[in-house]
Amino acid sequence: MDIIDALVSHHQELRKLYQASESDASRFDEFVRHLVVHHTMEEKYFYDLLQKVADARRDSLEAVNEHHIIELIIKDAEGFPKDHGGFPIKVEGLGEYTSHHLDEEEAEIFPMARARFSPEDLMILGKLFLEAKQKMLAIELPEVPAQINQRAAGSKQVQASSQGLGIGSLK
Ligand SMILES: [Fe+2]
Ligand SMILES: [Fe+2]
């Protein structure tokens, strides 16, 4: 599978995960995990190269900037507990902006890239993308022990700094 087909296939997974997390907040973390892995790998195996093509540079930089905006929306959504009334609105905002980004890549950027890279290079990049995606999604991070979470929540210093971020009142 070449890199463009691999990216489009992951986009389909992202759309399904967004739909799932709209109706079930417990799927949100999986959606975000895929989204962050997608951005990291898409930048490494696709945009870092497309940026080097003079007439594709501006569109590439714009797309990578959209990744940064999506990451800010993720951080904002993560500041809400999943049972908070505002959480579904945050998921919807993230999903809508992400869908727009995916549609634009498929309609404009990917056809442009297909015309500028050789089929051989696209195949090699696709193999690397799929391998890296599989490895990154397989990483399991150990959870922070509950006692440490409780001690952190009870610390005056932590309470003061979370108020400073403007999200302390939501928790
Ligand atoms: Fe993207
Ligand atoms: Fe993408």
Image (cartoon, rainbow, N blue to C red):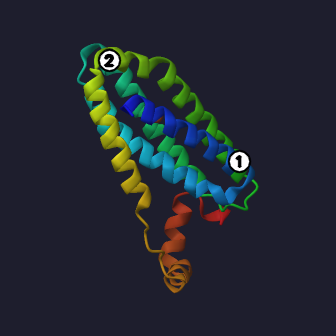
Give the secondary structure at mark 1: helix
Along the polypeptide, which appears first: circle 1 or circle 2?
1
| Viewer-nearest residue: 88 or 47 | 47
Q: Residue at 44% x, 43% y: name it.
A: 38
**Picture quadrant of residue 159:** bottom right
Q: Quadrant of the C terminus?
A: bottom right
50 is higher (above) or lower (below) than 89:
above
Q: Measuring from the top left, give residue 140's x and y in whole percent.
A: 43, 67
Q: Residues within 10 Å of mark 1 (few under 14, many from 20)?
A: some
How far apart marks 1 and 2 lie (CA) works out to 34 Å
Of the residues shown, which amino acid type is indicated by label 2? Ala
The residue beneath circle 1 is 22
Q: Quadrant of the N terminus?
A: top left
Ligand 2 neighbours mark 1 (CB distance < 8 Å): no
Q: Measuring from the top left, give residue 53's x and y in whole percent.
A: 25, 19
92 is higher (above) or lower (below) than 26:
above
The residue beneath circle 2 is 56
Q: Measuring from the top left, give residue 10's x and y in whole percent.
A: 50, 40
